Image (spheres, rainbow, N blue to C red):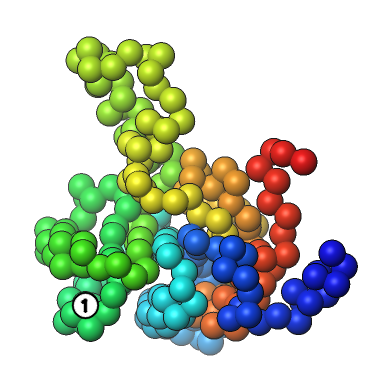
Amino acid sequence: MAWFRKKQEELTVDQLPKELIPKHIGFIMDGNGRWAKKRGMPRRMGHVTGAQTFRKIVKACEARGIRSATFYAFSTENWKRPQDEVDAIMNLLREYLKESLSDFKSENIRTKFIGDRTPLAPDILALIEEAEAETAHKTGLTLNIALNYGGRHELVGAMRVLAERVKAGEMAAEDIDEQCISDTLDTAGQPDPDLIIRPSGEYRTSNFLLWQSAYAEYVFMDVLWPDFSEEHLDKAILQYAKRNRRFGGV
Ligand code: IPE
Ligand code: IPE
Ligand code: MG
């Protein structure tokens, strides 16, 4: 075992046994504002660079054979920010979606959005629906973008759906179980995250995948998202590979 552990320390991600590679990684893309501030630039510039990092890390996940990746792009609480910052983030998303729609043909990525779509601008909503429809048949990486996402908001939505079903006589309250709650969330049918990476030096979930992360391994990193690189990703995966996941057992 000691030999194995030592050996593992020397391993690189491409040498890891397949079962030690996380199937689903969540990314809390944090630290854009601080990155910009440190450089005397407006916060918006941090989001511009952060969006480039996002593109790079999506490709890196695909290259490493990760099955699903969920990127936290905008939370249900982020509407509190100044309007110009919210607009800048939405514009970056528009740009990304327009650009991706022409790249989709050459890529094997299935794009999905999680979060409440109701307050989104109609043109963004149309782009999201097009992106999901165009990539629904793809078999490579499943890319979830969490937009206007909040774990609590998602759970409230699921509870309302289930309450309506009980009220309509379609199911009994006793039939509500963990599986049916999972199946009613935005991530229905997808595996729970194995690993959640939060850069920026903050040690909290900020309402990300609350239900789904029950047994996720967290890696907190002291790097701001715009500076997050493939090397940071590999370091986090190697840390994950060393963890002993017990799921309550011994
Ligand atoms: C990006 O980082 C996360 C988003 C909400 C888009 P922040 O904008 O939160 O950057 P910091 O945490 O203020 O540095
Ligand atoms: C979490 O970051 C949300 C996203 C990365 C989209 P925040 O910057 O909003 O989180 P707090 O405010 O530091 O908890
Ligand atoms: Mg932040």
Percent across and percent down for residue 133 are 15, 62
Residue that label 1 marks? 104
Residue that appears at 21% across and 62% down: 136
Percent across and percent down for residue 233 are 57, 76
Question: Looking at the image, is 134 positioned above or below residue 47?
Answer: above
Pick the quarter of the image with the C terminus: top right
Percent across and percent down for residue 157 are 32, 34
Decide which of 145, 222 is in the foreground and name it: 145
Give the left or right position of residue 35, taking residue 134 as reference.
Answer: right
Pick the quarter of the image with the N terminus: bottom right
* Residue 197 visible in the current orientation: no
Question: Looking at the image, is 15 positioned above or below residue 182?
Answer: below
Label 1 secondary element: helix
Disc 1 within 8 angstroms of ligand 1 (CB): no
Residue that appears at 38% across and 18% down: 175
Residue lying at the far right in this picture: please name it: 2
Going by the numbered disc 1, the residue's amino acid type is: Phe
Percent across and percent down for residue 205 are 56, 52
Question: Looking at the image, is 4 positioned above or below residue 230?
Answer: above
Residue that appears at 50% across and 61% down: 23
